[in-house]
Image (cartoon, grey):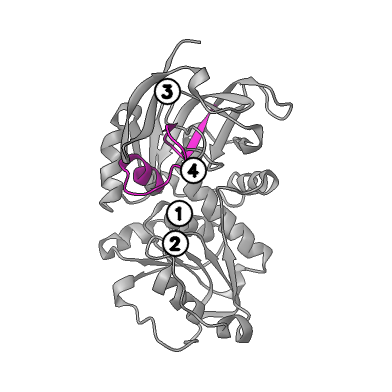
Amino acid sequence: MTDFRAYRINQEDGKITAGFTQLSLDDLTDGEVVIRVSHSTVNYKDALAATGAGRILRKFPLNGGIDLAGTVVSSESQDVEVGQKVVVTGCGLSETRDGGYSEYARVPSEAIVPIPDGMTAAQTMQIGTAGFTAALAIHRMEQNGQLPANGPVVVTGATGGVGGIAIDMLNSRGYEAVAVTGKSEQKQYLQSIGASDVLVRGDLDFGKRPMEKAQWAGAIDNLGGETLTWLTRTVGYQGNIASIGLAASHELNTTVLPFILRGVCLLGINSSECPRPLRMAAWSRIGTDLKPQKLDTIAANTVMFEDLPNTFKAFIDGKVVGRVVVEIS
């Protein structure tokens, strides 16, 4: 096989460097399956890694990109067939192994999920890690008794990739989804993807008591910190809070009272290290009852591989709404 193009991240004298380079398969981290990558995505985590604004990579050098989709070109696994259309999200991509910003990727078979029937590679990347995380959150909440009839589910960080797709998925499942955002100008966008109401974070009274008036049957939180603390105070009896991010803070200052007196359940969602059976189950639902209906609105932006570096700054500056797909080949 001839050399191919990749966007590679390195560290030199403590400083992060990144750029396009030519690689061969021998340069890639190990795995039983080689994939011809057609599409990837840009997540906030990808921007942090490529710019050095956050410490994401645990080894250097590595190709960036925590998501990829494409076609299997060789396989040493009985579970994965040559010619199969597949998707990989998380699983150490661009952390401990080469990621999706490459025309070819080599990954372990347990990371691979067949693309659901009726979906394209580009659509799976419109969903990507963000949508998979949203689906996993809803899946876990419903395993724990969450039902549309229980009442509204609030989603924080709603203009981000996870938040937007979570609202879309909840709406399609019959839930009343309420959006919380720091971007008041995005109210119309959030309503267009299914939010029944939009709350501006700066206008909220987070309260001070261990428990405030119950407002929500459940919550999906992207922020952590005082917002997550507020959710523990305001989610009602036997409600579920899916904690999926820490965009605001990793801290949580609360008491045990909501958990004891209201039976509130705090569910930690780790989509990156999700075991394959659960990963397969979530993607199966993404192709059926959790299939987003507003993907073309949430993921309206597609960039070519060569334009990738220009996209990272917009993420770091907080100027991106929704999802961005990268066309690799």
Classify mark 3: helix, strand or loop: loop
Outermost residue, top direction? 2
Residue type pointed to by label 2: Asn
User: What residue is shown at x 37% (from left), y 43% (from top)?
Assistant: 49
Q: In whole angstroms, how far apart are the C-alphas of marks 4 and 2?
A: 16 Å
The one nearer the camera, 10 or 247, is 10
Q: Nearer the viewer, residue 20 or 41?
A: 20
Within-10-Å neighbours for mark 2: few <14, some 14–19, many 20+: many
Q: Is residue 315 above or below residue 118?
A: below
In the image, taking residue 309 as reference, residue 85 lies left or right, namely: right
Mark 4 lies on residue:
128
Residue 122 sits inside the magenta stretch: no
Residue 314 in the image: state x and y as whole percent: 26, 46
Which badge, 4 or 1, is on the more N-terminal residue? 4
Give the farthest residue toward the right. 78
Q: Which residue is mark 3?
A: 329
Along the line of sight, the residue nearer the viewer: 176 or 66: 66
Residue carrying label 2:
222
Q: Amino acid at mark 4?
A: Gly
- Which region shows up in magenta? 45-70
Can residue 59 be found in the magenta stretch? yes
Circle 2 SS class: loop
